[in-house]
Image: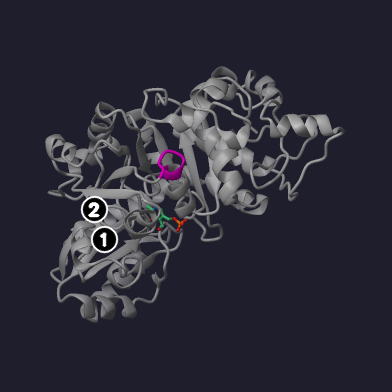
Amino acid sequence: MLLKLDYEEFNTYNGIVKQKMNRRIKMKIETKCLHEGYHPGNGEPRALPIYQSTTYKYNSTDEVGKLFDLSSNGYFYSRIANPTVGAVEEKIASLEGGIGALCTTSGQAASLISIMNILKAGDHIVSAATIYGGTINLFAVTLKKFGIECTFVDADASEEEIQKAFKENTKVVFGETIANPAISIFDIEKFAKIAHKNNVPLIVDNTFATPVLCRPIEHGADIVIHSTTKYMDGHAVQLGGVIVDSGNFDWTNGKFPEFTEPDESYHGVVYTKQFGKSAYIVKARVQLMRDLGAYPSAQDAFLLNLGLETLPVRIEKHCRNAEKIAEFLNNSDKIEFVNYPTLQGNKYQDLAKKYLPNGCSGVISFSVKGGREVAAKFMDSLKLASNVVHVADIRTCVLHPASSTHRQLTDEQLVAAGITPGLIRISVGLENIDDIIKDIKLGLSNI
Ligand code: PLP
């Protein structure tokens, strides 16, 4: 666990890992997916062990007391940290180029904790309007009940337009690298510049891109979050989320007293003083995870780790298959439009080249001519692709956002989130491309 360590030591996790890391080479992302996080010693298990224990034994009350004081480093209760989950956190932090990470029980919990770690009642969020429907709900409805307001902006607007959404009490900016389900590309550098001009951090949800395709920290994002339920797991067996801290944001700029003033729930600890550059991620763990209790089980972290090990191989095939499916759909006269950034003439082609040069994930959205009913008929005719409330899976799946994930949005919010009544989201899997095309042809022949 990452307590009472300064920045230089933080990267090395703890004393034991530090010795092992010193012997390691600088790794590329495919290698990191396999080798980061867990470093077995001589005679130890090769695969990441599942430490299915809620608690940890100590020899003295003094040692346990020091853990509660945050003055020594160690596991003590699996609501805050666990060695299996910790290995996955270290791996994901490394993949994103961050200094530390915190796993959560869902992507929603990651969004919530990443925001609550910064904001309190009376504060304000500026968010791109094109984001996941569940996050819109969280920001627009639930957080409002806690006294936090959100202004949604057109992510494609000019810097001057976006600046108008900022208020005295704005504390964070939020966006999604590849928006679900609009498949628009978020201009990370533009938003990082605006956020930093206003002395607030930028949080980027990098779920669809994954660090294999884009690493938002390299473009100025301060915090990166994921629903690990999606590509990171990839097999539809684990529900989870993660928050990654770049360690780059200056929490001492005067706007964030929660980081610079004593925390009465921790005997007056001042996070920026005691934890330096890792203040954000340590506070999220020891204060919010302690109080909100949304930490994943070791078993789930083990499953997530299996997914991460093959992530680059899967992502490559998802992208290549999706490029072909996007072209195929685009050539059909039964389709109104296709959103996929690599298509000629797509509005986001240039941003995709900049932020996602190796591909834009397996997720495409498109609209059939004829609206909602025709969309349903097309989806019900498919034999291979399954109609599931899921995305970013190894198996091809489809979903109708307006009647499912985004059902709670008003018509106005639907349009702002890039969703028309006939919009279908297809998440292209790893099947043979000929079989996926055959299935889509079948669907089209029935409408
Ligand atoms: N962020 C994005 C981009 C998503 O697509 C989702 C879910 O679909 C979430 C966050 C929420 O994640 P979870 O379902 O793991 O809570």
Vertical arrangement, residue 102 with respect to residue 238, above or below: above
Q: Is residue 216 left or right of residue 236?
A: left
Q: Regarding mark 2 in the picture, which secondary structure is present there?
A: loop
x, y percentage for residue 154? 18, 48
Q: Callout 2: few (<14), some (14-19), or many (20+) C-alpha neighbours within 10 Å?
A: many
- Give yes or no for contact between labels 1 and 2 (Cβ–Cβ under 8 Å): yes
Is residue 346 found inside the magenta-colored segment of the image? no
Ligand 1, what quadrant?
bottom left
Q: Which mark is residue 365?
A: 1
User: On the rendered image, what quadrant is the C terminus found in?
Assistant: bottom left
Distance from disc 1 to disc 2, alpha carbons, whole Å, reads 7 Å
Which residue bears the numbered disc 2?
A: 340
* Camera-side residue of 189 and 255: 255
**Number of numbered labels in the structure image:** 2
Q: Residue at x 71, y 39 (%)?
A: 46
Q: Is residue 335 above or below residue 293?
A: below
Query: Residue 187's quadrant in the figure?
Result: top left
Q: Nearer the viewer, residue 92 or 405?
A: 405
Q: Main secondary structure of the magenta part?
A: loop
Magenta region: which residues?
A: 115-120
Residue 444 location, x and y as percent?
23, 75
Q: Nearer the viewer, residue 399 or 175?
A: 175
